[in-house]
Amino acid sequence: MNTEHFIETRKRLSLSQEELAQGICTQATLSRFESGGSIPSVKILTQLCHRLGLSIAELFRTQADSRGEFINDTLNQAEFDLIISEYDHANQKLDELELTEEENEQFGERLDYIRGYLAILLGHHVQENIDGFHAKLLDSQTEIDIYTLLNYCGLGMGYAYLGKDQLAEKYFNFVFIHVFDFQSTSAGETWKILTILFYTAEFYSSSNLAISNRILETIVSMCSDNHMTFYLARSVLQLAENEAAGEANKTRLVNYLIDAHAYAKINRNQVELQRIDYLIKKWHLQDLAISSIFDN
């Protein structure tokens, strides 16, 4: 039983043993429990946990469980930072992790793809990370899984950054063909599919607006179906940029910006909010009455 978590919670709430035990059990009973001695009755333990705002189940989590939760929470935060373009903060979170060999077996693929994407997006050691994605694919199983698709997408991102668009398109095309065959079984996998689709759409925005728009509209639909807002701001803003690069229908352009601004505010996506402000000025939309929305 994880009595350390029990003790840490009591101390965090500034409760003495006497205060916690009052009306439930003797201080001696509580002291024996905290010192690793006898476990009190279920009734007493339930009341003590209730006073601390804990569930009994939390006390049965092992240190390994707690460590796994910490790693998973850190990777979740880094993935979210990747989504909202907070790349430096994502790297700071990942720097907190030093995985053991056993932990690397469980979390290594996820950590590596996030690190690789961040490095390419920040322009750090791009060729080295391209080589890393190639190595991952050589070592991977023949069956296509979510990390296979993420590695192919990473190669596309890397080659696009280096200006090798033909190579980049080869890998993005592979992703585009196969990602829709992948059946997501969790919210985490859906996040990853949205990530793959977004960077594929971003790549095609410079060469084929029709394909890019189709992918972005798919992202918006998937976000709506799965009640996820995280990629909405970036996807709708990319639709606005595609609109500006193509027919530039001003009404449609402004509507995209309004929607992107709303989604960015929901997700506290400061990077996208700043970019929206920049694009309003760049596209000379300040004079529109509708622009007052962005001041709120």
Image (cartoon, grey):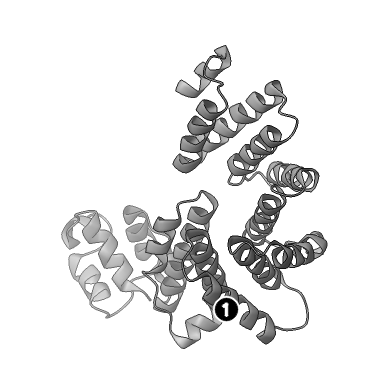
Q: Going by the picture, which residue comes out furthest to the front?
A: 163
Q: In this rendering, is residue 272 above or below 108?
A: above
Q: Position of residue 199 (x, y in %)?
A: 65, 55
Q: Nearer the viewer, residue 131 or 15?
A: 131
Q: Nearer the viewer, residue 111 or 18?
A: 111
Image quadrant in which the N terminus is located: bottom left
Q: Is residue 208 left or right of residue 122?
A: right
Kindly indicate the quadrant of the structure image that contains residue 242.
top right
Kindly indicate the quadrant of the structure image that contains residue 54.
bottom left
Q: Which residue occupies 50% across, 34% down?
A: 265
Q: Nearer the viewer, residue 197 or 47?
A: 197
Circle 1: element type: helix
Residue underneath mark 1: 132
Q: Which residue occupies 24% across, 53% down?
A: 13
Q: In this rendering, is residue 50 above or below 44?
A: above
Q: Is residue 286 left or right of residue 16?
A: right
Residue 60 visible, this angle: no
Crowding near the residue tagged with mark 1, few <14, some 14–19, many ≥20 C-alpha atoms within 10 Å: some
Q: Going by the picture, which residue comes out furthest to the top?
A: 289
Residue 272 visible, this angle: yes
Q: Position of residue 200 (x, y in %)?
A: 70, 56
Q: In this rendering, is residue 247 above or below 124?
A: above
Q: Position of residue 76 (x, y in %)?
A: 50, 60
Disc tally is 1
Q: Which residue occupies 69% across, 70% down?
A: 152
Q: Position of residue 126 (x, y in %)?
A: 53, 69
Q: Is residue 176 left or right of residue 37?
A: right
Q: Amino acid at mark 1?
A: Gly
Q: In this rendering, is residue 242 above or below 51?
A: above
Image quadrant in which the C terminus is located: top left
